[in-house]
Image (spheres, rainbow, N blue to C red):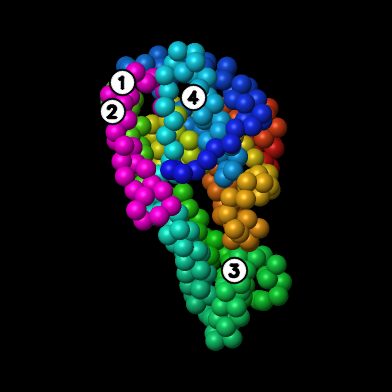
Amino acid sequence: MPGDKIEIGDSHIAKARTIFPALVEQLKKAAASNSFGRAVVCVHGGSGVGKSEIASILSYMLTSAGIKSYTMSGDNYPHRIPIYNDAERLHTFREGGVRALATSKLSNPSVIAKLQELQKADDDANEAHISEYDWFKTYLDGGRSALENYLGTPKEIDFEEVDSILSAFLNGADKLWLKRMGRDEASLWYDEVDMSDTKVLILEWTHGNSDYLSNVDIPILLNSTPEETLEHRRSRNRDGKLDSPFTMLILNIEQEKIKSQASKAKIIITKSGELIDFETFSKLMA
């Protein structure tokens, strides 16, 4: 995303070096089966796990080895800029919650009054309230379900455009029009990018291994638990509500979606920098 900074550290370099030999082997297979000798790689994982940094290093390593690559960010492809998408996420959660209360016939003026207190305090996604209010679990479950049907789906993200870009690249396009979206209403444009000599397109994105994409050859999963992800985000002070229950809910839903798609990953690396197979990943995340 325009304006975002990446800070490459020793751990990112170490992980990229661990990934690189396995990536090269996978690229040989993918390129051999493509008429233009091209391949699409995605570097994906939870928020704050180091996707941008590691993708940048891998791109540098490939180019240094004589394999020209380009890194594109999927963060440019939500339907809304961040401030509006954050608002839509919260609205989706709360609408799902109050709808569940109404459907279950648990909604009444006293419940709504208490709920609005929690909402104003940004505390209405806090599981601790389940033991305090007999209606709260219904609200929380309804909100979570609605949020699961929004996060990382075509309702939130233009997967069709992303997949069409990947397809065009694999089919030999010399140039691609890539979207740039910043954090305000005026920061939206497209750049024409020369791909004539590029052999590897790296998609750096939380949702890079999504089932809504069909043109990724080599998914690379940077694994982390929600707790590890949150700790990393805290160290970067990425937003003002790192400890909020709603932020944790989003991180957990994203983690579950990443976990459900992990069987497709060709390369999985742990936060400690160890390459693991899917069976080991499943045991680790059980």
* The magenta segment: 174-201
- Given contact means CB atoms under 8 Å apart, are the residues at marks 2 and 4 in contact? no
Q: Label 4 belongs to which residue? A: 59
Earlier along the polypeptide chain: callout 1 or callout 3? 3
Asked whether residue 284 is in view, the answer is: yes
Q: Amino acid at mark 4?
A: Ser
Using the image as rendered, state which of residue 191 and residue 253 is in the foreground.
Answer: 191
Mark 1 vs mark 3, CA separation in Å: 49 Å
Q: Is residue 189 magenta?
A: yes
Q: Label 1 belongs to which residue? A: 196
Q: Label 3 belongs to which residue? A: 122
Relative image position of residue 284 (x, y in whole percent): 69, 37
- Given contact means CB atoms under 8 Å apart, are the residues at marks 2 and 1 in contact? yes
Earlier along the polypeptide chain: callout 1 or callout 4? 4
Earlier along the polypeptide chain: callout 2 or callout 4? 4
Residue 269 position by quadrant: top right
Closer to the observer: label 3 or label 4? 4
Using the image as rendered, state which of residue 264 and residue 198 is in the foreground.
Answer: 198
Relative image position of residue 110 (x, y in whole percent): 59, 86
Q: Amino acid at mark 3?
A: Asp
Give the residue at the far bottom of this rendering. 109
Q: Label 2 belongs to which residue? A: 175
Asked whether residue 96 is in view, the answer is: no
Q: Residue at x 33, y 34 (%)?
A: 165
- Given contact means CB atoms under 8 Å apart, are the residues at marks 1 and 4 in contact? no
Using the image as rendered, state which of residue 159 and residue 282 is in the foreground.
Answer: 159
